[in-house]
Amino acid sequence: MIKLMINGATGYTGRMAAAHAKAAGTPFVLAGRNAASLSTLSAELGVEYRVFGLDDDAAIDAGLVGISVLLNCAGPFMRTANALVTTSIRNGVHYLDTAAELDSYRLAETLDDDAKAAGVMLMPGGGGSVAMLGSLAAHAVSRVNDPRKISIALHVAGGLSRGSAISAMENVTVETLARVNGDLVAIAADGFRKFDFGKGAVDCFPVTLPDLITIWRATGVPDVETFLHVTGDGFPQGNLSTLPDGPSEDERLANRCQASVEVTGADGKVTHSLLDTVNGYTFTAMAAAEAGRRALGGEVRPGFQTPAALFGAGFAQTIADTSINDV
C-alpha cells in the first residue's frame, strides 16, 4: 500500500499531525530516531513505525521503501531538511514539512529543477503560517487590479513549544528581509507599523518569514513585507531544552491565531482582509496532515510548490473553523 510517512512523529507537532492523519483514515507510518517513543506511539495509534537517523543515506533510502509522500515534522529543519529533501528526490518521494525557517524554502528553490526532473513535489510549509498567510494573501490579491505590494502580519498568542523556541534561537538572522521589486533585500529592523487584527490597530515589528518566498512565488507580486505581533509570555529565556513540549490543549483553545493583510494596487488603492483561525500549533498539525492526505491522493505537481498555489486560495478555510473576511 502506498503510504504517507510522518517523520518526527513523536515530537509536539508530529504527534498531533499523526492523530489527525489517523482520524482522517490516511494510511501512514511513523518515523524518527527514538525507537522506544515510536513504539509507544505506534501501539497507541495502531500503525507501523520505522527507525532511522539522518546521517546515513542508505538507512533513509531503506526507510522510505513503499512511501510516496513524506511529511517532515522534525525541527530544527536546518538539521533535517537537506538530508530528507535530497533523499526524497532520489527515491521519487514527494516532500512536505512544517518549517518556519527560511533555509528550508531556499533549499526548495535551489533543488526545484532537480525535483521537477524527478517528478517530485517539494512543499515546505505544508502547514503553519505558510498555508495560513498564503491563503489570506491569495484571497486579498484576487480583489485588486494589478497588485504591486503585499504587507502581511501574523498575530501569535500563547506560549511557544520547545521545538519552536529552539528553532527560532538557532535561526536568528542578522538581517531583516523584505521582497522589493522581486528581490530579497535587507531593511531596517525598527520599521514598526500598525495592523488591525479585528480589535483595533496594534504595533507589529518587521520579521523575516518564509512567506517572503512563498507568497511571492504564488502571486508574483513584486513587493512583499512580513510583520509579527506577539502577545503572551514572549520569547522564553534560559535553558530552552527544559521547556515543556508545547502549550496544553486548554492553552491552545484559549489562544486563537489571526493575520491581517493589506494589498496595494498600481493605482494606490489598498485592500484589507483578515484571517481568524484556531491556535497556530493546532492549525499547523491539521493543515500538514491534510496536505499530506491530499498529496497522497494525487494532488501533486513536481517542483517547489506552495499550499495556496497548489490546493487553492481557500485551503486554509478547509482547516478547522478558519475564516477570511474583508474589511
Image: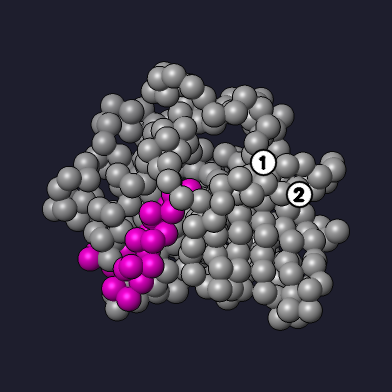
Q: Which residue is mark 1?
A: 229
Residue 208 in magenta? no
Residue 119 quadrant: bottom left
At mark 1, the secondary structure is: strand
Mark 2 is surrounded, within 10 Å at the Cα level, by few (under 14), some (14 to 19) or many (20 or more) other residues, namely many
Figure quadrant of the C terminus: bottom right
Residue 76 quadrant: top left
Q: Which residue is mark 2?
A: 195
Q: Please provide percent x and percent y for residue 209.
A: 53, 52
Amino acid carrying mark 1 in the image? His
Residue nearest the viewer, comparing 14 with 326? 326
| Label disc, if present, on residue 192 of the rendered structure | none
Asked whether disc 2 touches disc 1, contact meaning CB atoms under 8 Å apart, the reply is yes
- Position of 170 compared to 261: left or right? left
Amino acid carrying mark 2 in the image? Phe
Instruction: Tell me if residue 61 can be seen.
Output: yes
- Position of 115 compared to 134: left or right? left
Residue nearest the viewer, comparing 303 with 210? 210
Instruction: Tell me if residue 119 can be seen.
Output: no
At mark 2, the secondary structure is: strand
Q: Please provide percent x and percent y for residue 180.
A: 56, 68
Q: Please provide percent x and percent y for residue 276.
A: 74, 48
Q: CA distance from mark 2 to mark 1?
A: 9 Å
Depicted 49 relative to depicted 134: above or below? above
Residue span colored magenta? 90-114
Figure quadrant of the N terminus: bottom left
